[in-house]
Amino acid sequence: MIKKLFLTVLVLAVFPLLYAQEGKFGFIDFNGTLRQMPEYIEAEQNLRNIQSDYHEEIERSKREFERQYIEFMLEQDHLSASIVAKRQKELQLLMDNNAQFRDDIQMELEARRVELLSPLKEKLLKAISDVCTGQGLDYVVDTGKGTYLFINPEKGVDISESVYKLLGIETKEEQLVEGENQVLINKDNDKTQDK
């Protein structure tokens, strides 16, 4: 009985101490940081070029359908019922093929997007992991999702700048060249001129 009482008191004493220990956490906008990576801009341009090529093919198919449709409409009154039915089926098949082609393109573009962005996401995740390990953080909150309404800045650490530096992304405090003068822009958007 005394052992059970002692064990209960011990658990009640230790349990609050376990909850009182909070882990240090960092926060970053994952997708916002991803979009800042030079490789991301290159991947997006690559996707736009592919999409442009497909768009030209879609437009060509659309013009071909319209040409055949107009031709059919002009000749329809002079054709037999069996030829009209055959042409209608051909037009329907052409329209279905064009719709299927557009759907295939969308799936292929999404697959290419995943293929191009996966290595960048892995690189960003590694950089976040390295920064967290270096700063002794226990976990990271993605502020870009908008699910966190408040983060106490005294408890959390904004790791954005550290991750930017690790990835070689220019930060807000990098020097910009305006004409012959270099201008240093700090976080408060104050400008300091350097000649």
Image: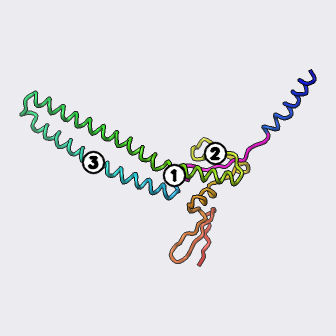
Q: Amino acid at mark 2?
A: Val
Residue with the mark numbered 2: 141
Check residue 57 in the rendering and tell me which mark sits there, or answer none. Answer: 3
Decide whether residue 27 is among the magenta residues.
yes
Question: What is the spatial separation of the Cα atoms under label 2 and label 1, in whole angstroms?
Answer: 19 Å
Question: What is the spatial separation of the Cα atoms under label 2 and label 3, in whole angstroms?
Answer: 43 Å
Looking at the rendering, the stretch of residues picked out in magenta corresponds to 20-34
Q: In screen coordinates, is 2 left or right of 70?
A: right
Tag nearer the camera, 2 or 1: 1
Instruction: Point out the image quarter for the C terminus.
Output: bottom right
Which residue shows up at 59% across the image and 51% down it?
A: 126
Q: Amino acid at mark 1?
A: Leu
Q: Amino acid at mark 3?
A: Glu
Residue with the mark numbered 1: 120
What is the x, y in percent for residue 6? Answer: 91, 27
Q: Is residue 33 visible?
A: yes
Label 2 vs 1, first from the N-terminus: 1
**Disc 1 packing (10 Å; few <14; some 14–19; many ≥20):** some
Label 2 vs 3, first from the N-terminus: 3
Instruction: Point out the image quarter for the N terminus.
Output: top right
What is the x, y in percent for residue 155? Answer: 73, 48
Q: How many marks?
A: 3
Colour scheme = rainbow
What is the x, y in percent for residue 123? Answer: 55, 52
